[in-house]
Each structure stands twice: as C-alpha cells, then as structure tokens.
Amino acid sequence: MYSFFRKTIPIGSAQSSRSLSLIFSVLIFLLSFVAACVFTFSHGFHNWESSSSYKITVEIPVNMQSSQEHVSNVDRVIGELKGMSGVTNVQRVDPEKLKTMLKVWTGDTSTNIDFPLPTLLDVEFDNAQLADTDIIKQRLRTISSDISVENHSNWSQKLVIFGKSLKLVTILIGSFILFCAAIIVILVTKSALQAYYSTLDILRLLGAKDSYIAKIFQNQVLKSSFYGGIYGVMFAIPAVYAFMIVIKRLGLEGLYWNSMLWRIIAVVSVIPLAVALLGVIVSRVTVLVHLRILDGKAH
C-alpha cells in the first residue's frame, strides 16, 4: 500500500543509496584497519611482555683471554646460573645469530666478522623478583670481572607502555570513525525527513505509524551499510594482510603478530555487522525524535 511513498523518500533513491554505500565502504575500511591495529597492539605487546619480563641476558666478553679460558669461563657461568634459585632455562645464543645482529652496526654484507665475539646467554626465570641483575652480577663477577647482565624488563616495560599508548590512540580513532558514521546517518535521515515531511505526513494520514516510517529508513540504511560493508571488507582484508606481511618483514615475529592474522581477519569480518547495527539504531531514533520535532513546528 505504501510502496509509492517508499520510493519517493530520497534516502532510498539509487543515487543516494550508492553515495551512502560508498561512505560506509570508506568508514568500514578505516575502522577495520584501526581494529586490526588495536588487536595487534593489544595481543602483540602483551605476548612480548609476558615472554620477556622474566628473562635476562648475560654477556661474557673475550678480552685478552685465550679461547680455552673463555670456554672454561662460559661453562662455569652456565653452571653458576643453573644453580641459582628460580632459573628454568639457560640457553647460549647462536654465534651466527649474533653475527647477523651485528651486521646492522658493522654494515658488513657477509657474516665473516674477524674480531672475537662475546658469548651471550639467555636466562629464563619463573619469577621476575628472582631476576635481580645486581645480585646475579655480583655472583657472576667472581668468575670474571667483565661479565655484564641485562634485564629485559627494563626496556620491555617501556615498550609495553608505548604499545598501550598506541592502543589508546587507535581506540580513540576508531571511536571517532564510529561517531562520524552516526553523524552521517543522522544528517542524511534528517535531510530526508525535512525535504519530504509533507509526503510522510500523507503517509501517516493514511494510517502509517511512526515506527513503520522509521522501519523504512532503517531498512534503507541497513541495505546501504550491507553493500558498503562488503566493499569495505573486500579492501580491508588485503590491506590488513599486507600490514601483517610488513610486520613480519621488519623482523618483529617475536611479537607473535603474524600468528594473529586469521584472528584479526575474523574480527575485521564482524565490523560491518556492528556498523550496520549502529546505523539501524541511529536512523530509527533519529526518525522517531525528528518527526516529533517537525510535528511541533508544523503546529
């Protein structure tokens, strides 16, 4: 019965619907990328913090020692560390890995470094309080006075704070995008109501309730957000995948970001539903409230 009036409402026209779908596509793309960043920062830095806060690195320099003396000192240090309370694992860093790390500083394109390299030991504790670098350093320097100890928690805590700051910023950006989506739905709905109030008034005189009119608008917003969500996700998933590849290429696998790929894609796929739900609620509330305002002005 009301199909004619339904077609005359401008938000339902083909051009308006395409424009609104395009806007939703852009917003969902941006929101998907922001959500991927939030998920990455949240899980990645948490995993890094939990995996690094109970670790220390012990450096045993070569100095003027002979290779035999150095090996002897390394063995004594490993034995001392394994005898300490709370130590769960002592692992010697692969010399080839150390050479690869040094290439960044030496600028050497090969791994043939001709100067003696210190021995690094990764030590894991089951309790952060037991990883007291001062006490450990005092005990190990009875073996060699040049031994140094680095506690990972000193820099990992700063990195975690930085990660939480990034997470907060991305959450604020995501909230702003959702706010923009709500404002756009409100403006489009109000413009349609004001421009075609007389048509809607006739529809109401024929017996249509405000809830029915609100349903027309929310269905049109749902349709636009659905098509916009499809295109937005189609572009967002490759962008998120490329983002994860870049993270992996930068050598940040230790954050476990690359293992989060499928979880992040699952989160991104849910975003269009959330945006569509927001659009439906906002459009319905806008119609019901603004119709009363227009009725008051008319009378």
Image: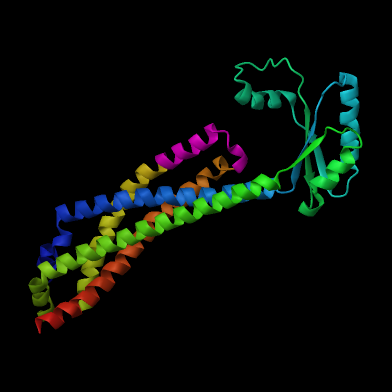
**Looking at the picture, how far across and down is residue 291, in whole percent?**
18, 76
Q: Quadrant of residue 275?
A: bottom left
**Looking at the picture, how far across and down is residue 18, in whole percent?**
20, 51
**Which residue range is magenta in the image?**
238-255
**Looking at the picture, how far across and down is residue 290, in whole percent?**
20, 75
Which quarter of the rendering shows the N terminus?
bottom left
Total numbered badges shown on the rendered structure: 0
For the residue pair 292 and 216, the one nearer the viewer reads as: 292
**Looking at the picture, how far across and down is residue 244, in whole percent?**
49, 39
Q: How is the image coloured?
A: rainbow
Q: Residue at x 84, y 44 (%)?
A: 136
Q: Main secondary structure of the magenta part?
A: helix
Instruction: Give the farthest residue toward the bottom.
Output: 299
Q: Is residue 6 visible?
A: yes
Q: Quadrant of residue 234?
A: top left
256 sits to left or right of 130: left
For the residue pair 216 and 77, the one nearer the viewer reads as: 77
Q: Residue at x 26, y 52 (%)?
A: 23
Which quarter of the rendering shows the C terminus?
bottom left
Q: Is residue 298 on the magenta stretch?
A: no
200 versus 20 height, above or below:
below
For the residue pair 156 and 27, the one nearer the viewer reads as: 156
Q: Residue at x 85, y 47 (%)?
A: 135
Q: Is residue 209 visible?
A: no
Q: Residue at x 25, y 56 (%)?
A: 224
243 versus 280 height, above or below:
above
For the residue pair 192 and 167, the one nearer the viewer reads as: 167
5 sits to left or right of 49: left
Q: Is residue 246 on the magenta stretch?
A: yes
